[in-house]
Image (cartoon, rainbow, N blue to C red):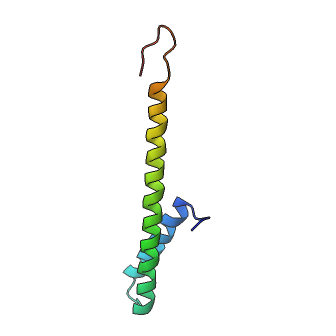
C-alpha cells in the first residue's frame, strides 16, 4: 500500500461497498473483498491519525513561537 493515497483508498472502499450491496454476491469473492476493505480501512485510519498528530505538532509549535512586540498571542 506504499503508493496508495487516502483518496484512492476511500474510492476503492466505496467500490467494494457497491459490490457487497449488489444482488449477485459470490461468497468467495465477498470474503476477499471484506479482507481488502479491512486493510483499506486500517490504512485510512493510520493516515488520519498521522495527519492529526502532524496538525497537533504544528499547532503546538505555533503556540510556542514568541509574539512580536505589541501583538497579542493567539
Residue shown at 41% from the left, 79% from the top: 34
Q: Is residue 27 left or right of residue 12?
A: left
Q: 12 or 46, which is in the foreground?
A: 46
Question: Where 39 falls versus 52 (above or below)?
Answer: below
Question: Where 64 falls versus 25 (above or below)?
Answer: above
The image position of residue 60, as x and y in percent, is 44, 33
Asked where in the image residue 73 lies, by quadrant, the reply is top left
The image position of residue 56, as x and y in percent, is 43, 40
Q: 70 or 20, which is in the foreground?
A: 70
Q: How many badges with numbers are in the image?
A: 0
Quadrant holding the C terminus: top left
Query: Looking at the image, which residue sits at the far right?
Result: 3
The image position of residue 33, as x and y in percent, is 45, 81
Question: Where 73 falls versus 29 (above or below)?
Answer: above
Residue shown at 51% from the left, 66% from the top: 9
Quadrant holding the N terminus: bottom right
Asked where in the image residue 48 lies, by quadrant, the reply is bottom left
Query: Looking at the image, which residue sits at the far top?
Result: 70
Q: 33 or 47, which is in the foreground?
A: 47
Amino acid at each position: 500500500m506504499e503508493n496508495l493515497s487516502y483518496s484512492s483508498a476511500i474510492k476503492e472502499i466505496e467500490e467494494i461497498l457497491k459490490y457487497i450491496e449488489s444482488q449477485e454476491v459470490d461468497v468467495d469473492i465477498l470474503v476477499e473483498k471484506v479482507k481488502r476493505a479491512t486493510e483499506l480501512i486500517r490504512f485510512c485510519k493510520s493516515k488520519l491519525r498521522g495527519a492529526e498528530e502532524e496538525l497537533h505538532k504544528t499547532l503546538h509549535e505555533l503556540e510556542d513561537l514568541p509574539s512580536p512586540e505589541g501583538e497579542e498571542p493567539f
